[in-house]
Amino acid sequence: MHYFIGTALSAFFICSSAMAQSVDFIEPKNNATVSSPFKVKFGLEGMQVAPAGEMKEGTGHHHLLINVPDVAEGAVIPMDDQHRHFGKGQTETEITLPPGRYRLTMQFADGAHRSYGAKMRKSIEVTVK
């Protein structure tokens, strides 16, 4: 968002600090067919990656959910094989899955693993051959 402040002789554009916040899969793309193991790269806009435990506004870390329901905003993301945590601040990983069709969900969460909800979630489907 930009604001215009000025007179006929001068103009200033002030950028708002409120950027759009979102996550996306850089790799793989939706409906991709992949061979196991395969690389997953997380994309992030409008926030910063920080390690688990750091409770600073505008920060968090990635979680990869595999074939599970979405985690509601404010709920703590479980830690198991289907809810993978990247609490060291990782922005990519390599995962191994048996052949089949999968729903992968990237969920960004705060330093206490509390989901930022739908606004910071992205799901794709992949087929592992």
Image (cartoon, rainbow, N blue to C red):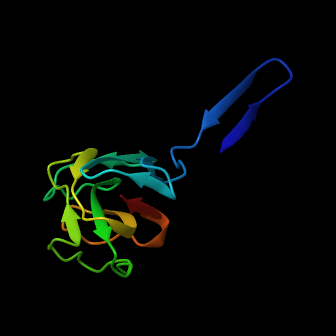
Quadrant housing the N terminus: top right
With respect to residue 110, does 44 lie above or below?
above
Q: Quadrant of residue 121?
A: bottom left
User: Going by the image, does 78 lie left or right of 28?
Assistant: left
Residue 35 position, x and y percent, is: 32, 50
Residue 46 position, x and y percent, is: 46, 47
With respect to residue 31, does 78 lie above or below?
below
What number of labels is visible?
Answer: 0
Q: Which residue lies furthest to the right in this view?
A: 8
The residue sitting at 62% across, 34% down in the picture is: 14
The residue sitting at 26% across, 52% down in the picture is: 36
User: Going by the image, does 27 lie left or right of 56?
Assistant: right
The residue sitting at 32% across, 78% down in the picture is: 74
Q: In which quarter of the image is residue 5?
A: top right
Residue 37 position, x and y percent, is: 24, 50
Quadrant housing the C terminus: bottom left
User: Going by the image, does 96 lie left or right of 23?
Assistant: left
Q: Quadrant of residue 66?
A: bottom left
With respect to residue 119, does 94 lie above or below?
above
Q: Residue furthest top?
A: 9
The residue sitting at 57% across, 43% down in the picture is: 16
Q: Nearer the viewer, residue 6 or 61?
A: 61
